[in-house]
């Protein structure tokens, strides 16, 4: 009985349940698996602060490392700030502050030598030409080669400037607001004790959220309206798609209303590592930095892919990469752009038709085999294409399928199966089908 299968799609939609992540680590090109900060530039590249490996820049395909060999003061990087206006990167490190501008690294530690101390832990610009720096000496605004103190002798891990120009300072011993008029407010718990161990501050909806140890403190203006407890040492937060993402020493949580919290686990691709930092890219995909296992990038779980050139006739999955064939190309799915990109142009003489059976497979030598129906099979090795045909008693014997297992490749024809070896193609067995 003949059975023909035709996949003829103008649009493909992949739906996976919940958030799914992919790990990127030393084996992928990261110089260190200890991640302290993540930032995004205008080209949608991820700048990665590693503690011990310098800075790594990920363009979606590969990592580029910038370290002491390139001119950084140290490879112990703690925080980054990407200035998209100046096209420059500020680098906060262990006892150092650097500026990367084009291909030049400037040692700002010499410029601001009186205020740069060990552990530059926070960098930001709320206003043009005003760099906010937090280190062991306190919080400073660096402007016109001068360091203007905002709050001295207080260890601050995060700073937030609200719409009324008040600075919220997440301190180790206090949660402090430096008002526009210069006065200081020490915000307290409901029992009037200090809010200690503050790690991050974010605006979520109409409220300001402060993470401190195992708790979230929710403020409306300066009024504490809610406290959420038992979240196990919060390290960072991110607002994305109307959700608050919370990184802890025991993994990642998501909430929309502070009543229910979803924990992401191994099923989502996120084991229980300490989450150090979170960002979102231009596609609203979340990136997660851990202190022990590199970074995790969120995969789009509701992907709509439209092939602009032609219909995609067949797909295969090889090493967790999705490949396909169109009328003109072998294509490969790119997770960052959510598109199929051409990797091999097919011989025009092939003239693929939707009325034919098509299939694709890839062997361990990265050789592509394409079912081309009446034309037999097409083998592509390093861009070179050859035809594999097999004729038996009748001239009409179209190829209809292909399967690879170990070192053997099974070519399925209309009335036979030809088994070959992927290293040296030859027929080792022919099975006849009546």
Image (cartoon, rainbow, N blue to C red):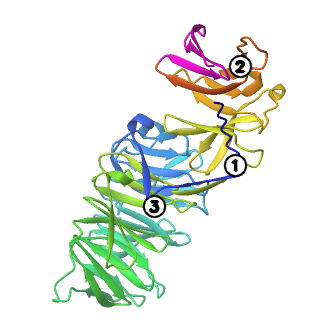
Q: Is residue 133 above or below residue 423?
A: below
Q: Secondary structure at mark 3?
A: strand
Q: Is residue 34 above or below residue 155?
A: above
Report the residue marked by disc 2.
Answer: 384
- Mark 2 and mark 3 lie on one chain; the one further toward the N terminus is 3
Report the residue marked by disc 3.
Answer: 279
Q: CA distance from mark 2 to mark 1?
A: 28 Å
Residue 156 is one of the magenta-drawn residues: no
Q: CA distance from mark 1 to mark 3?
A: 34 Å
* Corner quadrant of residue 212: bottom left
Q: Secondary structure at mark 2?
A: strand
Q: Is residue 303 visible?
A: yes
Q: Position of residue 422 (x, y in %)?
A: 55, 15
Report the residue marked by disc 1.
Answer: 9
Q: Which mark is residue 223?
A: none
Q: Position of residue 253 (x, y in %)?
A: 33, 65
- Mark 2 and mark 1 lie on one chain; the one further toward the N terminus is 1
* Corner quadrant of residue 8: top right
Residue at (70% x, 49% y) in the render: 9
371 or 390: nearer the viewer:
390
Q: Which residues are magenta?
A: 407-434
For the image shown, how many numbered marks are present on the structure?
3
* Corner quadrant of residue 113: bottom left
Residue at (44% x, 37% y) in the render: 28
363 or 428: nearer the viewer:
428
Quarter of the picture containing the N terminus is top right
């Amino acid at each position: 009985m003949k059975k023909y299968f035709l996949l003829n799609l103008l649009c493909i939609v992949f739906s996976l349940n919940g958030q799914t992540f992919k790990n990127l680590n030393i084996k992928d090109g990261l110089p260190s698996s200890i991640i302290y900060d993540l930032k995004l530039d205008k080209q949608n590249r991820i700048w990665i602060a590693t503690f011990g490996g310098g800075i790594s820049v990920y363009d979606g395909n590969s990592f580029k490392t910038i370290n002491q060999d390139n001119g950084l003061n140290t490879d112990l990087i703690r925080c980054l700030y990407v200035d998209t206006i100046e096209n420059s990167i500020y680098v906060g490190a262990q006892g150092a502050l650097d500026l990367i501008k084009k291909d030049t690294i400037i040692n700002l530690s010499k410029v601001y030598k009186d205020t740069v101390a060990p552990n530059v832990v926070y960098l930001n610009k709320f206003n043009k030409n005003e760099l906010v720096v937090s280190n062991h000496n306190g919080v400073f605004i660096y402007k016109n080669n001068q360091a203007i103190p905002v709050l001295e002798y207080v260890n601050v891990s995060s700073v937030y400037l609200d719409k009324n120009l008040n600075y919220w300072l997440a301190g180790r011993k206090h949660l402090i607001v430096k008002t526009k008029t210069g006065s200081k407010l020490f915000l307290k718990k409901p029992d009037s004790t200090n809010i200690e161990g503050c790690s991050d501050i974010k605006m979520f909806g109409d409220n300001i959220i402060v993470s401190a140890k195992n708790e979230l403190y929710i403020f409306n203006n300066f009024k504490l309206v809610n406290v959420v407890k038992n979240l196990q040492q919060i390290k960072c937060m991110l607002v994305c798609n109307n959700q608050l993402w919370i990184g802890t020493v025991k993994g990642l949580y998501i909430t929309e209303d502070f009543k229910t919290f979803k924990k992401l686990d191994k099923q989502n691709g996120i084991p229980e590592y300490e989450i150090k930092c979170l960002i979102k890219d231009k596609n609203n995909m979340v990136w997660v930095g851990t202190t022990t296992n590199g970074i995790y990038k969120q995969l789009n779980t509701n992907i709509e892919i439209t092939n602009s050139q032609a219909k995609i006739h067949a797909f295969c999955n090889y090493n967790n990469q999705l490949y396909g064939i169109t009328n003109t190309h072998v294509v490969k799915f790119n997770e960052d752009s959510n598109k199929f990109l051409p990797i091999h142009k097919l011989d025009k003489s092939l003239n693929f038709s939707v009325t034919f059976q098509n299939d694709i497979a890839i062997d361990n030598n990265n050789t592509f085999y394409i079912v081309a129906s009446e034309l037999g099979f097409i083998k592509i090795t390093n861009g070179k294409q050859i035809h594999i045909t097999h004729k038996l008693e009748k001239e009409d014997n179209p190829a209809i399928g292909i399967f690879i297992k170990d070192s053997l490749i099974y070519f399925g024809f209309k009335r036979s199966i030809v088994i070959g070896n992927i290293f040296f193609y030859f027929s080792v067995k022919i099975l006849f089908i009546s």
